[in-house]
Image (cartoon, rainbow, N blue to C red):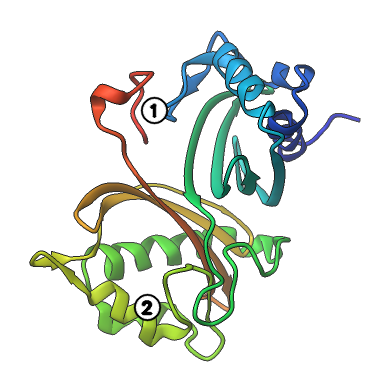
Amino acid sequence: MAKSQINQIRDLLKCIETGASEPLSVVNEAKYIQHNPQTHEGSEGLAALFKRLSKTEPKVNMVRGFEDGAFVFAQMEYDFTSRKICFEVFRFEGGQAVEHWDNIQERTGPNQSGQSMVAGPTQAVDFEMTESNRAVVRFFVETVLIDGQFDRLTDFIDADIYTEHNPRLGGGVSALRSALEAENAGGRHIEYHRIHRVLAQGNFVLCVSEGNYGGVHSSFYDLFRLAAGKVVEHWDTTEKIAPRNEWKNDNGKF
């Protein structure tokens, strides 16, 4: 029986821990487009990276994995020389992975509400709601996070049961609003400028965005869990986008 795309990616990323080479065959080296600015192109680049990382006795765990057509998106726990949380996105074509994006952050926390960066439900449900949930998240990010209509937070978030996993935030909508409204050198500390991709499966939706965090050009990966048409849980990573002269490929972060 053929492995699902999620399981193929799970095996691929487990190579970071095991050093195995066979799962790397899921990557089509001839077509592979790498969007991690710190990684060289192709499966040869991945093989070299994974071999180097395996020497640090790392631990690799896929916390959540989802499929959206040709895309697999997953939340990962990595323990290299330090613990990290990462979102990985792969695009498949012809049964192989041909494109890759990621967003990684040091693992800290728990946050003020006692929530870790990875706790909570892991399995998608409500598959018939995939497209409506995708639309809700896109509208939420455009309206609240980009346009700054913070008074509309509860139009999209169920304040009674909302759970926040961002290690810098407390629980509840009021803490989220305070963080979004906070200023940095005359502008918002957290600034969302543009959505690049919205991936969804059932009640889980991942939004990939670009903006500034503390005045630094950054990428935002936000994973939302929805129930009854509203956001009830949120996980994320924020990563500084390296300066162009430090890139090891020419494909861009997004």
- Which residue is painted at 47% across and 67% down in the image? 166
Q: Quadrant of residue 147?
A: bottom left
Q: Who comes first in sequence, dot 2 or dot 1? A: 1
Whole-percent x, y for residue 92 in the image? 61, 28
Q: Is residue 194 above or below residue 179?
A: above
Which label sits on residue 188?
none
Which quadrant: the N terminus? top right
Whole-percent x, y for residue 85 in the image? 56, 51
How would you rate the neighbour count of disc 2 (Cα within 10 Å): few for under 14, some for 14-19, many for 20 or more? some
> How far is the residue under mark 2 from the one under mark 1?
30 Å
Q: Which amino acid does the dot numbered 2 rest on? A: Leu
Question: Do the residues under discs 2 and 1 have CB atoms within 8 angstroms?
Answer: no
Q: Is residue 119 above or below residue 70?
A: below
The residue that disc 1 covers is: 37
Whole-percent x, y for residue 170 in the image? 45, 80
How would you rate the neighbour count of disc 1 (Cα within 10 Å): few for under 14, some for 14-19, many for 20 or more? many
Horizontal side, residue 147 vs residue 115: left or right: left
Whole-percent x, y for residue 202 in the image? 64, 60
Q: Which amino acid does the dot numbered 1 rest on? A: Pro
The residue that disc 2 covers is: 176
